[in-house]
Image: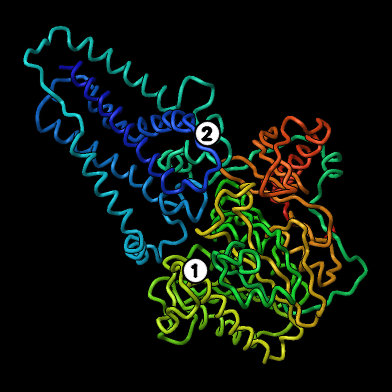
Amino acid sequence: MYVESLKTLAKRILYVTLFYSFCRLLFVRFHYSTFDEINLINFLGGIRFDVSVIIYTNLLIIIGHSIPGGFKYGGPYQKILKLVFFITNSIFLATNFIDLVYFEFTGRRSTFDLITAKGMETEIMGLIPSYVSQYWYVALSFLVFITFFWKFIPNFKTPKTQNTSVKSVYSILGFVLVLGLSLVMGRGGIQEKPLSRIDAVNYSNINTNVIVLNTPFCIMKTLKDKEKLAVLSHFEDDALQEIYTPIKHYNEGKVMTKKNIVIIIAESFGDENISYSTPEVGNTPFLDSLISQSIYFPNGYANGRLSSEALPSILTGVPSIFGESFINSTYAFNDIESLPKILAKQGYESAFFHGAFNGSQNFDHYAKVAGFDAYYGKDEYPTPGHEDGKWGIYDEEFLRFFGEQTGRMSPPFLASIFTISSHMPFVIPNRYKGAFGDSKSLFHESVGYTDYAIKKYFEYAKTQEWYPNTIFVITADHCSMLAKKHNQPPMENYAIPLLIFDPSNDTPEINLKNIQQIDIIPSVLDYLDYPEPFFSFGNSYKNETNLIVNLVNNNYQVMIDNYYFIFDGEKITELYDTTNKLELRNLQHSISDVKKLELEQEIKAFLQTFNNNFINNTVSIKEESK
């Protein structure tokens, strides 16, 4: 009887492993065009990650099958055990189905913060019905999936002949052996360190490691609320300063031009949605017209794939390389020099606007920590009847409110707004249905609507006294679900529009420098001839220094000049020439050792500066040192 119980356990572990593999096949089917190369190793290696999380999430089942005692052979006990097995595994398998959709927006497997909607608790219950309605086929597929899962779960069969002699000795030994084997399988083997997300690179490249991983494993590995940075010691202090310094000082001795600053962050407006860059997909006629009058950066990049990662990058200059959003990290309350704090010393008034529910993604809390004088969300919007029924206030009305409120601020002012209408479920006013060309998708239509809302905002702003003395920065938080497929390099999945528009400047420019969200603060300050030193991980667009960095599945994606490479924390594992982005040239074995070492030193110096300054809370310049 005991042996039969262990056989049933083994069958059930194998059974759920097969369903995890099927989820992997579904994931690849849904996102096939995203991957540049798929092979059998991705799937075979993925089984190791599947088994690891299956063991941990089924510990109760393992104990229930292997614990000594004859009580477990009864019918009621076995029925309860089977039901617990079904419910437990259905819950975790469901998270794989969530990523059939969510991966389109994040470009990575979901983690604990994402799957639990951390920072979005207020609105998530209202959004779930919309998600299910829009992606009904995923919900239906899951119902069919778990129906089959339940129907064929291996059952415990009581042997016709029962040998109970010395069963207590063998059952105790078996229990110990099963728990020991489970421990080994759960940690992924007998290697020194337990299996982690970064180990997926052993079975894939940076583009396909999401195939190897599964969502329950990624959730399990990010259960801790805070991920701590590691102290790095690649260089002595003097050597480090020669390679990289976060202290920027561009305009010593000059007098700052105290123009008003307006920063518009357009939800999901990846570069692929801008008509200027992608005419066959884009739906942004107004932004296209503004680009022709601005300093425009066609090689702009986001520092993350989530809205909660974009805000700190744009307004605080912090790239999302913590392994979690800076807003939710243990370093969120560090004394860091944000744009509002720097400008406050120059007499600027500041305000942040977000038309969603107050508390959405913790933006209201972030605005306070970042030093904004005021926050305006849905609760502060005065006019009823403009709610979209999902997120908050429609972009057109909230942008008008934004313009009116900034007109009440004392110049010089810093005002920033984060739009919402081009966020799933892509709700626009009924009066505009079909008004923005042939609707390729709900998202495509919502992009056209937000572009129109920005146009209406500028029509209003031009009538205001503060307009001529204002610079406008327009960018996106991240790419969208319509991002170009087969992007080479993968950093192109982070491509966003970025422009600086100054009504008083009649000299437009197409600037081909690689630029990222954390470069916005130093670029704005440099543009205005800010004369004081300040702390920033980014660089001005006028500066030749060129380093783009992102963290994806515990690997750093880095661009320095025309080089794109993957850095695992110690060494470069992949290296390409991006001169022709449509046809990357692999340089891993042809580049000189000297140049490769130079690139490694640059990223090591950056990361050492980043980690150690955040750990020591030295991410600002103290007044006495200026």
Amino acid carrying mark 2 in the image = Ala
**Which residue shows up at 16% across the image and 29% down it?**
155
Q: Callout 1: helix, strand or loop?
A: helix
Measured along the vertical axis of the image, is residue 457 above or below residue 327? Answer: below
Question: Pointer 1: residues within 10 angstroms few (<14), some, or many (20+)?
Answer: many
Q: Residue at x 76, y 84 (%)?
A: 469
- Color scheme of the displayed model: rainbow
Toward the viewer: 585 or 336? 585
Q: Residue 518: tell me if it is visible.
A: no
- The residue tagged 1 is 444
* Rendered location of residue 56, percent (x, y): 37, 32
Residue in the foreground of this view, choosing between 337 and 454: 454
Q: Position of residue 285 (x, y in %)?
A: 61, 76
Residue type at the position of mark 1: His
Looking at the rendering, in which quadrant would you find the N terminus? top left
Res. 201 image quadrant: top right
For this view, does 318 lie left or right of residue 70? Answer: right
Q: Farthest left residue? A: 160
Q: In which image quadrant can residue 169 be found?
A: top left
Name the side, left or right, on which 267 lies relative to 388.
right
Q: Which residue position holds label 2? A: 200
Determine contact: label 2, label 1, CB under 8 Å: no
Q: For this rendering, which residue is in front, 354 or 229?
A: 354
Whole-percent x, y for residue 309 in the image: 58, 57
Q: Alpha carbon of mark 2 to alpha carbon of mark 1: how far? A: 34 Å
When the figure is inspected, residue 80 is found, relative to residue 422, above or below; the finding is above
Q: Which comes sooner in the sequence, label 2 or label 1?
A: 2
Where, quadrant-wise, is the C terminus in this rendering? bottom right
Does residue 373 sit above or below 519 in this rendering?
below
Q: Residue at x 76, y 34 (%)?
A: 234
